[in-house]
Image (cartoon, rainbow, N blue to C red):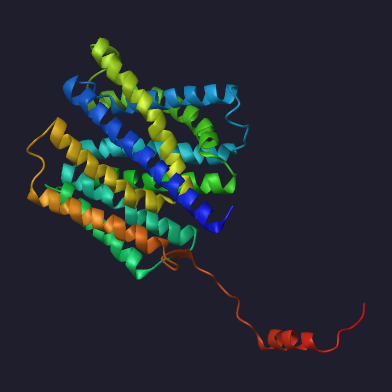
Amino acid sequence: MAPGSKANKKATVDAAAWMFNVVTSVGIIIVNKALMATYGFSFATTLTGLHFATTTLMTLVLRCLGYIQPSHLPFTELLKFILFANFSIVGMNVSLMWNSVGFYQIAKLSMIPVACLLEVVFDKIRYSRDTKLSIGLVLVGVGVCTVTDVSVNTKGFVAAFVAVWSTALQQYYVHYLQRKYSLTSFNLLGHTAPAQAATLLIVGPFLDFWLTEKRVDMYDYNVVSLMFITLSCTIAIGTNLSQFICIGRFTAVSFQVLGHMKTILVLIMGFFFFDRDGLNLHVVLGMIIAVLGMIWYGNASSKPGGKEKKSYSLPTTRQQKNGDDSDEGPRLKA
């Protein structure tokens, strides 16, 4: 295949992966908002456990059909991933409860610089000036869109700190594990989803009771609420899979930066379906700034030197240089 054709094919697959993630992520947010706001199902951690249980069922079916090949992931690596992922979910829920919405949004935005730091420290990535500025523009734009009242307290700050670092580590680890152990997105989900489902379904009801003072087993289930729960779990399969596909094909930083397009779409769809007073001039201005930043980031990071690994060259000693020059002279026979 010609280089141009391979590049076009990669670009098409990349775009399809992003679109898959955006559609499923926005869809699940809208469905969950309706489920929680309209039908009062406020058990977010338990619902996430059900999401991973459904995803586990999907991976088992695909394995039986032969679409997922056997693979190996060391238990210690799986354990670290589950700790990061579950602390991310729990931390986000607790952070939202203990902090103002404005500080919660600031904490979410801080995941981008934290993800950048992880890539710089562990992968020796170097960002160009334009790439850094474009990330900053995205942060400003999304901040204008979402940050309103900002108040912070000690326990809220601790919860946000844990949520931000665990989420950044979890997303970094997705890329790291796929690369190190040559795992596909389906393979990695097949290893991680069952463990996450088991732990969240055990911890979830207790955590949700602590956060909401309501018991999930005492919820007034009906046909409509069960339909929304089923729809949420079905969409979650695509959300979980597309997240692993996108981070595997790109990096956690790119996933975070371009992923804020989902934030903008959620704001727009929320305006149409829920709160018609939520879209005003400064929110629209923030959206425009964020989109321009994302376009700039995509352009800057794809250029040579926009985002690349640092190369370290060993210093050449005088003796090595003389040795290299002597290669042109007579050689000893073995």
Front-most of 276 and 6?
6
Q: Number of numbered discs present? A: 0
Q: Quadrant of residue 93?
A: top left
The residue under the point 60% across, 39% down is 74
Asked if 326 appears above or below 25 in the picture, the reply is below
Q: Position of residue 250 (x, y in %)?
A: 45, 51
The residue under the point 45% across, 67% down is 304
Left or right: 261, with 253 as reference point: left
The residue under the point 38% across, 38% down is 20
Left or right: 276, with 41 as reference point: left
Asked if 141 appears above or below 204 in the picture, the reply is below
Q: Quadrant of residue 229?
A: top left
Q: Confirm whether residue 155 shows in the render.
A: no
Q: Position of residue 162 (x, y in %)?
A: 34, 45
Q: Confirm whether residue 86 shows in the render.
A: yes
The residue under the point 23% across, 41% down is 265
Q: Position of residue 46 (x, y in %)?
A: 34, 24
Front-most of 197 and 68?
68
Q: Position of residue 77 (x, y in %)?
A: 54, 41
> Quick one: quadrant of the C terminus?
bottom right
